[in-house]
Image (cartoon, rainbow, N blue to C red):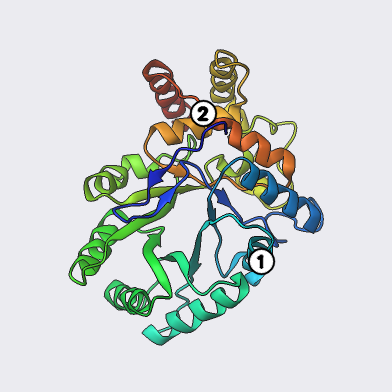
Amino acid sequence: MSETKFVQLGKTEIQITPMGLGTWQWGDRMLWGYNKTHTDSDIRAAFQVSVDAGINFYDTAEVYGSGQSERFLGKFLKEISNQMVVATKFMPYPWRISKGALRSSLQDSLKRLNLKQVDLYQIHWPFPPVPIQTWMDALADVVAEGLVRSVGVSNYSTSQTKHAFDSLSRLGIPLASNQVEYSLVNRNPERSGLLTLCQELGVSIIAYSPLGKGSLTGKYSPENLPPGIRSRHYNKMFLARIQPLIRILREIGQSHDGKTPAQVSLNWLICKGAVPIPGAKNMQQAQENFGALGWQLNEEEIAILDRVSEEVKR
């Protein structure tokens, strides 16, 4: 990016780039084929390209690669002088039933990340049986200890988000974000009212899988399925159905100096007010992702993408 611009993370004082980097692929073998489709050197290159592009927001989780993603990020952060905004997540497994479990998990994440404090700590899923209030109290505790700068949730519904927001508000802490799956092939945050609610409350929407796990890049088709278990959901029928959307993405991209379907898809999310966090397995993917910045779709193009994505969904 020629000039780095920032957006506010929720109602906190934290400033982040309008797009971050997701690190789910770093160390994950089951879904993303770590050590088959990408290596340690590929991951390092993806990180360095992101830093060079001015990206300051990096999202990981304790479960990504069973902690390997956090280890990669922690190692890379030690090698640079830039101040980055780091987000990670706590997985509330059913056997984790006390506030102490969150604090212990956070300390383990901090060790892997080589940090004394994480900028954004998120509850990964709203799993039962522990009530939302318990985890919000636990988040408030680690903020008070100085282990966490801001707090968020992930995969929370509209009602769960409001519950979390109200619980934290009573403790004097803002709910910074809700990280949800959001893309042109998954517009549930719009349909459910979650996007509107978060905008009203001042809660940032962080969009994971913003490229539909690769389906919006245009590199897959009914004749060329994604590798591994992704092909079960993103199958021939699904990929055939979204081809009209891919064609429109290409057409719109051509009118913006040859932007790719992926870059147009990411820019659409930014225009919606979300912060997309596309993943990158290698330098080339990182470079393509960040071509979504520095320009903007117009209202007519956004409306066309809205309409076509609705049609292919039906």
Element type at mark 2: loop
Q: Quarter of the image holding residue 245? A: top right
Whether residue 237 can be seen here: no
| 2 and 1 marks in contact (CB < 8 Å) | no
Image point (56%, 39%), residue name: 211
Whole-angstrom CA distance, mark 2 to mark 1, is 32 Å
Element type at mark 1: helix
Find residue 65 and name its label: 1
Image point (66%, 69%), residue name: 71
On the picture, is 261 further left or further right than 139?
Answer: right
Residue 190 drawn at (x, y percent): 34, 40
On the picture, is 106 further left or further right than 260?
Answer: left
Q: Amino acid at mark 1?
A: Gly
Q: Quarter of the image holding residue 121? A: bottom left
Front: mark 2 or 1: 2
Disc 2 target residue: 294
Image point (41%, 58%), residue name: 155
Q: Amino acid at mark 2?
A: Gly
Residue 117 drawn at (x, y percent): 48, 71
Image point (57%, 31%), residue name: 2
Q: Quarter of the image holding residue 225? A: top right
Outermost left residue: 170
